[in-house]
Image: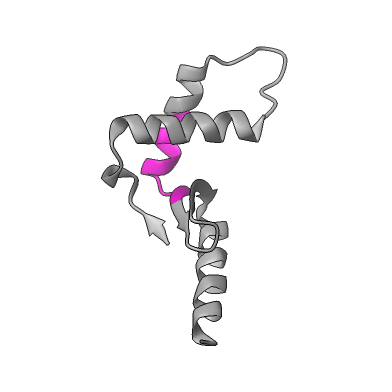
Amino acid sequence: MIIPYKQLSSDALQGLIEEFITREGTDYGEEEIPLSVKVEQIKQLLKRQEIVVVFDTTSESVSILPRRDAALLEQDNDAGRGGD
């Protein structure tokens, strides 16, 4: 289920973004980019809806995913509920 990021408290959103950044371990090349810059980049992606906040009902966890992956996850969850 996609959750509008604006519904999260600023502290919760900050923590989620920082967890996403450190988990991804993206290589930014030779020059290290400060965490604050990375956080701002993620916020811009959220604003443009290229990535979204998702609550996975199966694992009962919240994460950030590319919009396409979130749509696939929702389809899988809907298909699973349809068989009940």
Q: Position of residue 40 (x, y in %)?
A: 42, 26
Q: Position of residue 19 (x, y in %)?
A: 53, 32
Q: Is residue 46 magenta?
A: yes
**Where is 30 relative to 57, above or below?**
above
Q: Position of residue 7 (x, y in %)?
A: 27, 46
The reply to whether residue 40 is in sight is: yes
**Where is 49 relative to 30, above or below?**
below
Q: Residue at x 60, y 28 (%)?
A: 22
Q: Is residue 84 magenta?
A: no
The quarter of the picture where the N terminus appears is: bottom left
> Closest to the observer: 45 or 8?
8
Q: Residue at x 56, y 30 (%)?
A: 21
Horizontal side, residue 23 vs residue 67: left or right: right
Q: Residue furthest bottom?
A: 83
Horizontal side, residue 47 vs residue 83: left or right: left
The reply to whether residue 42 is in sight is: no
> Closest to the observer: 56 or 65?
56
Q: Residue at x 45, y 18 (%)?
A: 36
Horizontal side, residue 84 vs residue 22: left or right: left
**Where is 51 relative to 82, above or below?**
above
Horizontal side, residue 25 vs residue 7: left or right: right
Instruction: Write down the quadrant of residue 69 in the picture.
Output: bottom right
Q: Residue at x 46, y 26 (%)?
A: 39
> What colouring method underlies this structural image?
one colour
Q: Which residues are magenta?
A: 41-53
> Closest to the observer: 82 or 34?
82
Instruction: Write down the quadrant of residue 83 in the picture.
Output: bottom right
Count of number-bearing discs: 0
Q: Position of residue 49 (x, y in %)?
A: 41, 49
